[in-house]
Each structure stands twice: as C-alpha cells, then as structure tokens.
Image (spheres, helix red, strand yellow):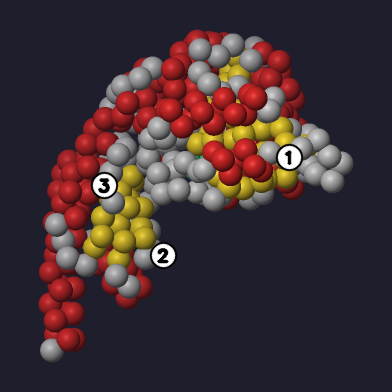
Amino acid sequence: MIDYRSDTVTRPTEAMRLRMASAQVGDDVFQDDPSVNAFEAKVAEQAGKAAAMICASGTQSNLCALLAHCGRGEEYLVGQEYHTYRYEAGGAAALGGIVPQTIEMEADGTFSLATMERRIKPDDPHFPVTRLVCLENTHCGKVIPSAWLHEAIKIAREYQLASHLDGARIFNAVVATQKELSELVAPFDSVSICFSKGLGCPIGSVLLGDEDFIRRARRWRKMLGGGMRQAGIVAAAMDYALDHHVERLADDHQRAQRLAQALSALSGLVVEPAVTNMVYIQFADARQAASCADFMAKHNVLIPAQGLRKRLVTHIDITDAGLARTIELFQIWSDTNKSGLSRQNG
Ligand SMILES: Cc1ncc(COP(=O)(O)O)c(C=O)c1O
C-alpha cells in the first residue's frame, strides 16, 4: 500500500527499532528512566525551553498544556480549525471545564488579530476569564508567517495571557524555513511537538515549557493515565528521530511539490500548491471524488475516501517509485474520467 492519508501511518524503520530494543529503561513515573531523562533534556535544550515531558500523543500533550495553563471557567482563544479545538474531542472542556473561544480562520492558517483582541474578555463576572492564546504551526501543511505569530503573542502579553503552540509538525516548518527550532518556538510559553507523524516514531509527543509549567503538566499527565513506566523505549525512538529524521523531511516536501505539480496538470482537479508535506486536491463533484479514491485503492494507493477536498500527505514511507506510480495512476484515472465525461456529454 502507498498510503497518503496521513503522516501518522509511518512505521518505525529497522534502525529505529534497534535503538528502541537496546534502550536503557527505568520507571518514568518515578522520573528515573535514563533514556527519557536524557531525551527530555536534549529536546528542551534544542527548543530553548527549560523543561520537557514526553506524552503518549499530541492530543495528550496539548490537553496537559491546556489544563496546566487554564482552570475551570477560564478560556483559551483558538483558531476555529485548529486541532486543539476541533479534533481533540473537546477534552479541555469535558475534562477541565475550559471554554474555547474560537476565531474564524483565513486560508493561510492565520486569523484576524483585531478579532482576537476583541474576543479577549474584560474583567467582568459575566464572562469566563481569558487565560491563553493557542496557535498552530504548521497548519494544514502551511508554515505560519512568523511576523503574524509574533504580533499575536505581543497582543497576548499585553493582556497577560499565556501562549501555547501546537507544533505537532513544527519540524516541517524548521526544515521549510531553515530556521532553528528554538527560534520558531521562542515566543511561546509552551509548545507541543509530535514525533509520531513525519518524524516516523510509532508513538510519542513532547511538551516543553518552563520548570513550573512542566511540573503542573506532569501532574495532569498522571491524572489522565499518561504516566508511562519503562518509557525509555519510546524516548529512544524519539531520540533516534531527532538525530536522523528531521533533515529528511525536505524529501517529503519535495515529493509533495512534485505531486502537486503533476496533479495540477490533470483535468478534473484543482490543486493547491504544497509548502511542506501536504497536497490538497479539490474534485468537481462527489462522484469524481469517490471514483478517484476507489480507483486508487484498487491499485493499492490510499487517499482519503470522504470529501470533495482531499489531503494527500507525503512521509518517510512514500518513495520516489511510489510517487511515480501514484502520478501514473492519477493520470490514468483522469484520462478515463475525461473520456467517461465526454461520453456522458455526447
Ligand atoms: C496539528 C495537530 N495537532 C495535534 C495532533 C494530535 O496528535 P495525536 O494524533 O498524536 O493525538 C494532530 C494529529 O494529527 C495534528 O495534526
């Protein structure tokens, strides 16, 4: 199978598995797993933050962050399409009594900062207490402009709000912009980074922030059932990915660009330019979208089955040969589709 549904489908390489198998381990809930401790110190240093804590998933890491920043009846400002609001099962509200104040988004992954500022609540007993601004980079494969991020955080600070970055794919932004991780995350009080997406680990995210924040987040992680014991096996994979799978993200970005270019030449598809590892394609109607997904699946290429606008994600398990085969199949589908349409019209 050549699987474009997400970069979460990646499987650990042989070398990563070997590192995991030979990892030294202890009990991480007692904070005496040497592999976890070493990895947390290393990633914290790279990110320019004082402390780090590994989590089972990005959802858990973001949730620990929201719970550590906000109390019950307090709110966070968040883009309407950001993962922390839309795709994390309402965990912050359900488990923390935290109110999301959403903001309508622009196509580039930002939102109006004037709207954000208007939605910060005054000190009035009618309102929830606004505590946090939560942003995302990359969003839908787009690198968020750093000037906008800095301006958003400047406003947050003026109102004494904390800031969290869902940096699930921040290393894609690091590679695309050729900036240091520490530079991209510097404005934020806390950051969550996923290792089980483009970085190819089977599991694992990391939450970063100052010592006091990570101490509070650690308590929440325990309460959420996320205290893992011999987690050095996970940290070993994450450490391996940090050393070996960051620079190679450039290959995923190039393949995404090649895919976008090739598909934009086909009739029946509108293709958005790829910036990092995601290509968005829009079909004219539901029949064509379904016929394309079916045709691809029959030929062992997986793309999302639902929706007129489909996201194709490149990652470590998509090779040049796989990409060439995919482009060839799209071409065949497009030609067949075109002749089917002209027969219908005729
Ligand atoms: C932007 C973003 N943040 C957070 C997550 C959550 O990660 P996980 O699936 O590990 O919970 C995802 C998952 O796809 C994501 O795309």
Question: For the residue with label 3, is its CB less than 8 Å from the closest atom of ligand 1?
Answer: no
Residue 31 vs 91, above or below: the answer is above
Q: CA distance from mark 2 to mark 1?
A: 38 Å
Q: Is residue 144 left or right of residue 186?
A: left
Q: Is residue 327 left or right of residue 84?
A: left
Residue 241 vs 253, above or below: the answer is above
Secondary structure at numbered mark 2: loop
Contact, mark 2 vs mark 3 (Cβ under 8 Å) = no
Q: Position of residue 282 (x, y in %)?
A: 31, 61
Amino acid under disc 3: Pro
Residue 267 vs 203, above or below: the answer is below
The label shown at residue 273 is 3
Q: Earlier in the sequence, mark 2 or mark 3?
A: 3
- The residue at the far bottom in this view is 346
Amino acid under disc 1: Lys
* Residue ID for mark 2: 306
Secondary structure at numbered mark 1: loop
Q: Quadrant of residue 9?
A: top left
* Residue ID for mark 1: 121
Give the mark toward the camera: 2 or 1.
1
Residue lying at 74% horizontally and 47% vertically, measured from the top left: 94
Q: Position of residue 284 (x, y in %)?
A: 29, 70
Give the mark toward the camera: 2 or 3.
3
Q: Is residue 30 left or right of residue 154?
A: right
Q: Earlier in the sequence, mark 3 or mark 1?
A: 1
Give the mark toward the camera: 3 or 1.
1
Q: Which quadrant of the rendered structure holds the C terminus?
A: bottom left
Residue lying at 17% horizontally and 65% vertically, measured from the top left: 267
Residue lying at 70% horizontally and 42% vertically, measured from the top left: 92
